[in-house]
């Protein structure tokens, strides 16, 4: 081999990788990046398979953050619509540090009609409406509703939640014992897209109801906290349900606080009255909008941290894949490393070249993961009643994670490459 770095065997010529033989052509980092991209493109199939773990990991993390942002905005907007004059009584301890149960509002309920009566007797309470989740299916003939939550309430619910109607009205004292119902706009558009729904029959839990009203379209989207839209709900009179099955357990009590009354004082009076009803057991929660938001954020942040932690395993797997492939690449390019060192490349130059290649591999995978997550976020509203929000900080987080994965899992191969002895390396076959 002569001093120009050429192999003296016939038919074989070796040359230093870009970034060494032409240092005068540009800064070393740029040339290292060019060399890294050339290597990745040259082995495109291996590059694609190696990036797959990073693509899945970053895409999943971005999707989780986007879904979390969207849900947080939607539910925050829904809870804000309750205002300061509405409180909700929920079974189970949903606030405080003692006896806290984040799932307390689900399953069997310990609220009864006696609790509703006790609440109505408190000064500052203008009205109260119990709410019972009915479950079961909703059908128009043989066609099922895509998504619907049937609930039973009393006529006061319409004034407590300040419902407006596009057609018809809410049921009142004149027909609350009859098989009638009120539906949200979303349910109307699903089951009666071209027809006037008022007066039409609707089957709920094998019982036929006549629609008497359609709630006007709201601005936020569907939710489960009784938010400002209520599009996916179907309401039946609680009195009619009780005539069929007796008095069911109550899952929620919506309380309308009178204007001018101190909401905190009214809530405390409600709490004391319910404590007396429950024999001193603090097994319920009286929540206003700020408490609902606090509860939601507590549960949401816990679940988000858990899900992101689980999803991050994909990034670790992707990083290990990058490290393994880079170690194979170092072995394959041992002769190139020897030639580079022979013509003057320092250990630092070799280290930076292979580290740059690992980071480029990780960042490319992360970029594809972010692009995939963005596409899925755009398509999600076509299939689900969710609106994911990709925020700038989430994208920044994605790229930061990619760079971190590339550096952490690229150091070992880069160190291995930089420590190779030039004499042994140049003899490598």
Image: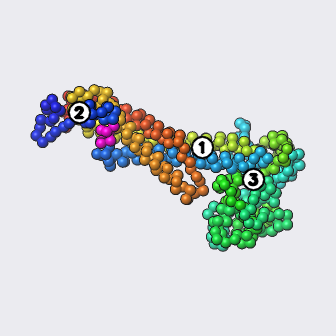
**Residue at image mark 1:** 303
Sequence-earlier tag: 1 or 3: 3
Report if the CB atoms under discs 1 and 3 are less than 8 Å apart: no
User: In this orientation, which residue lies closer to the viewer: 88 or 4?
Assistant: 4
Tell whether position 36 is magenta: yes
User: Which residue is at 41% across, 44% downward?
Assistant: 365
Determine whether label 2 and label 1 are within 8 Å by CB.
no
Give the structural element (helix, strand or loop) at label 2.
loop
Question: Mark 2 sits on what residue?
Answer: 21
Please indicate whether residue 1 sits to the left or right of residue 121 in the image: left
In terms of image quadrants, where is residue 276?
A: top right
Question: Gap between marks 2 and 1, in whole Å?
Answer: 53 Å
Q: Where on the picture, by quarter, is residue 333?
A: top left
**In x, y percent, where is residue 339?**
21, 32
Callout 3 crowding tier (Cα within 10 Å): few <14, some 14–19, many ≥20: many
Contact (Cβ within 8 Å) of mark 2 with mark 3: no
Residue 136 highlighted magenta (yes or no) = no
| Residue range highlighted in magenta | 33-39
Residue 86 lies, in percent from the top left, at 78, 48
The residue that disc 3 covers is 251
């Amino acid at each position: 081999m002569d001093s120009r770095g050429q192999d003296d065997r016939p038919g074989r010529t070796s040359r230093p990788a870009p970034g060494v033989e032409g240092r005068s052509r540009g800064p070393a980092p740029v040339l290292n990046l060019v060399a890294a991209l050339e290597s990745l493109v040259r082995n495109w199939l291996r590059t694609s398979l190696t990036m797959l773990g990073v693509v899945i990991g970053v895409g999943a993390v971005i999707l989780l953050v986007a879904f979390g942002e969207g849900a947080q905005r939607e539910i925050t907007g829904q809870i804000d619509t309750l205002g300061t004059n509405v409180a909700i009584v929920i079974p189970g301890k949903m606030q405080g540090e003692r006896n806290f149960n984040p799932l307390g509002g689900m399953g069997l309920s310990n609220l009864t009609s006696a609790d509703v009566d006790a609440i109505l007797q408190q000064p500052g309470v203008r009205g109260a409406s119990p709410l019972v989740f009915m479950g079961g299916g909703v059908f128009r003939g043989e066609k099922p509703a895509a998504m619907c939550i049937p609930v039973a309430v009393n006529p006061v619910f319409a004034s407590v939640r300040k419902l407006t109607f596009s057609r018809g009205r809410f049921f009142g004292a004149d027909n609350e014992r009859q098989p009638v119902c009120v539906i949200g706009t979303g349910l109307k558009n699903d089951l009666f897209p071209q027809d006037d729904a008022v007066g039409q029959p609707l089957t709920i839990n094998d019982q036929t109801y006549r629609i008497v009203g359609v709630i006007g379209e709201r601005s936020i989207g569907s939710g489960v906290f009784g938010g400002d839209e209520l599009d996916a709900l179907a309401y039946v009179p609680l009195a009619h349900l009780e005539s069929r099955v007796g008095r069911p357990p109550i899952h929620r009590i919506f309380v309308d606080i009178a204007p001018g009354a101190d909401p905190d004082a009214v809530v405390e009076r409600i709490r004391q009255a319910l404590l007396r009803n429950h024999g001193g057991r603090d097994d319920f929660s009286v929540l206003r909008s700020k408490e609902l938001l606090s509860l939601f954020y507590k549960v949401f942040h816990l679940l988000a941290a858990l899900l992101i932690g689980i999803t991050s395993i994909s990034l670790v797997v992707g990083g290990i894949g990058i490290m393994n492939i880079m170690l194979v690449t170092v072995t394959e390019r041992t002769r190139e490393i020897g030639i580079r060192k022979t013509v003057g490349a320092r250990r630092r130059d070799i280290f930076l070249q292979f580290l740059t290649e690992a980071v480029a591999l990780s960042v490319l995978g992360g970029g594809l993961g972010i692009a995939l997550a963005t596409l899925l976020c755009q398509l999600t509203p076509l299939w689900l009643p969710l609106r994911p929000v990709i925020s700038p900080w989430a994208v920044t987080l994605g790229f930061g994670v990619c760079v971190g994965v590339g550096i952490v899992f690229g150091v070992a191969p880069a160190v291995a490459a930089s420590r190779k002895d030039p004499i042994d390396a140049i003899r490598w076959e």
